[in-house]
Amino acid sequence: MEPALKRLVVVSNRLPVALRKDEDGWKLKQGSGGLVTAMAPVLKNRGGMWIGWSGTSDSGAELDGLMDDFTEEAGYELCTVPLTEEDVDGYYYGFSNEIIWPLFHDLQSRCRFHPRYWRTYLDVNFKFAEVVARRSSPEDYIWIQDYHLMHQAFFLKSMGVRRNTGFFLHIPFPPPDIFMKLPWRAKLIQALTEFDLVGFQTVQDRRNFVGSLHRLMPEARVEGRGAVVTINMGNRSFRAGAFPISIDYAQFSDMAARPDVVQKAFDLKEALRHRKIILGVDRLDYTKGIPERIRSIQTLLRRYPDLKGKVNFIQIAVPSREEVDEYKELRTEIEQLVGRVNGEYSFPGWVPVHYHYRSLPHEDLVAYYAAADVGLVTPLRDGMNLVAKEYCACNNKGDGVLVLSEFAGAAAQLQKHAYLVNPYDVEGIAKALHRALYWPIEERKAHMTRLREQIRRGNIFRWVDSFLRAGIAKSLDDFPEADT
Ligand code: GDG
């Protein structure tokens, strides 16, 4: 008989806290992302644990004390995996961000396939697995997050440690022709088959994974249909499924309705003289399609002179991986493009593009979402894209339009009621924007209402629940199908 699940152990590259050192010493703050919000209640109820890197190579009694205080307050334990600077360089900046990140986003020309990165990736995955083995017990459910830790089940098994393991990939899984470029493709795909459950954002990602699996491990047989399938490897089997991640809908929608946030949104509109607002919000990353988006705004103003002086495009770009050259170059490219469009079209009293290179406080971000007439979300490729869902959740008036890249995972779910565009097609985006800005209010409301309802139902709590159910269910009959 299988043991009953006692605790949930979440494993991710980073712990769900931010550490900062000032003149008085270390400070620790709980992270505020959707993942933390969704996991925290489950971890608390089950008395679980989160294992990850603290974000610093420093250690000592002061940091341990802060972690203990956190455990007491949050109701679940934090457990640090100590990493050296070399580890972080090869495993995080190297293998994860210079190989897997671009390759899995179909941008293989940006990959640097250094063998050293691969070796460090394995070493660090081994270090994580040692901590997981030591700090968990056989009844625990081990939920591993994302591409940094794809070898966890493999190493646990090689140590002879039996655990029920689930893995969720937050980024896309590429088509087989792209995956095959990876020099370590066979080892990596085999490592993924060692998990008991492998979760993807979309059915297409799962299909891509199965496609590569068939090429590299021809003995694999897929059984079943629907959101979760069983993959039989001859001597053992595992499950693979699509679990589209989401947001804490109520938290966003309620915040957008708060009087102080409504006031902030109004002040923003007032400052822009109640012109139409098109909004883009992204981490500054080359997968997000920001330069193409700015070019589409340039095309919009060139093609449709009626919009001059009547519309503003606001781009919020959150600094990310700033020490990496490619990200520095991207920042320069974006700033030059913004300068070019503003140089070409501004006149006294109107600057078309407003560009913020910083992270906004949560309330301010929600006010921007609430004020925007169009949410413009055009990644070249994206696992899901939470911004698309957050924009809709904050649009309490229900009259906004979501213009969404067909290559975002979110498009698989939201395609019926979002305006889908090809992020490389700047003229197509310009046309979509022009239409969106002139769309009759009844139609906008009809589509936005459906989008909001869909996101409200398929929220982050449902995501956690459906993944855990699939992970813990003994057979697929015990598992109600996820909404894809
Ligand atoms: C990865 C996958 C997948 C943005 N600006 C500010 C701010 N944000 C927050 C947003 C949103 C988050 O950052 C970005 O999430 P995305 O999903 O859009 O993108 P990634 O960071 O690339 O996430 C992605 C996701 O994992 C989850 O599985 O959807 O495909 O790439 O939540 O709100 N937050 C604050 N100020 C800002 O200025 N406070």
Image (tube, rainbow, N blue to C red):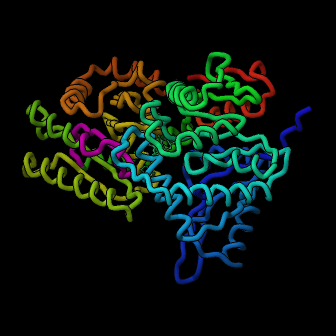
Residue 139 found in image quarter: top right
Which residue occupies the foreground of this view, 186 or 374? 186
Residue 464 found in image quarter: top right
From the top left corner, tell me how far across and down residue 83 is, in percent.
Answer: 61, 67
Please state if 67 lies on the left or on the right of 424 as rendered. Answer: right
| Residue depicted at 58% across the width and 43% down the height | 188
From the top left corner, tell me how far across and down residue 320 is, in percent.
Answer: 40, 57
Image position of 102 with respect to 377: above or below = below
Find out whether residue 276 is within the magenta segment.
yes
Which residue occupies the foreground of this view, 338 or 155? 155
| Residue depicted at 16% across the width and 34% down the height | 300
Which residue occupies the foreground of this view, 166 or 433? 166
Quarter the N terminus occupies = top right
Find out whether residue 266 is within the magenta segment.
no
| Residue depicted at 68% across the width and 78% down the height | 60
Q: Which residues are magenta?
A: 272-293
| Residue depicted at 15% across the width and 40% down the height | 298
Residue 200 shows up from this direction: yes
Quarter the C terminus occupies = top right
Residue 226 found in image quarter: top right
Which residue occupies the foreground of this view, 244 or 156? 156
Residue 384 shows up from this direction: no
From the top left corner, tell me how far across and down residue 189 is, in percent.
Answer: 59, 38
Q: How many marks?
A: 0
From the top left corner, tell me how far across and down residue 402 is, in percent.
Answer: 36, 30
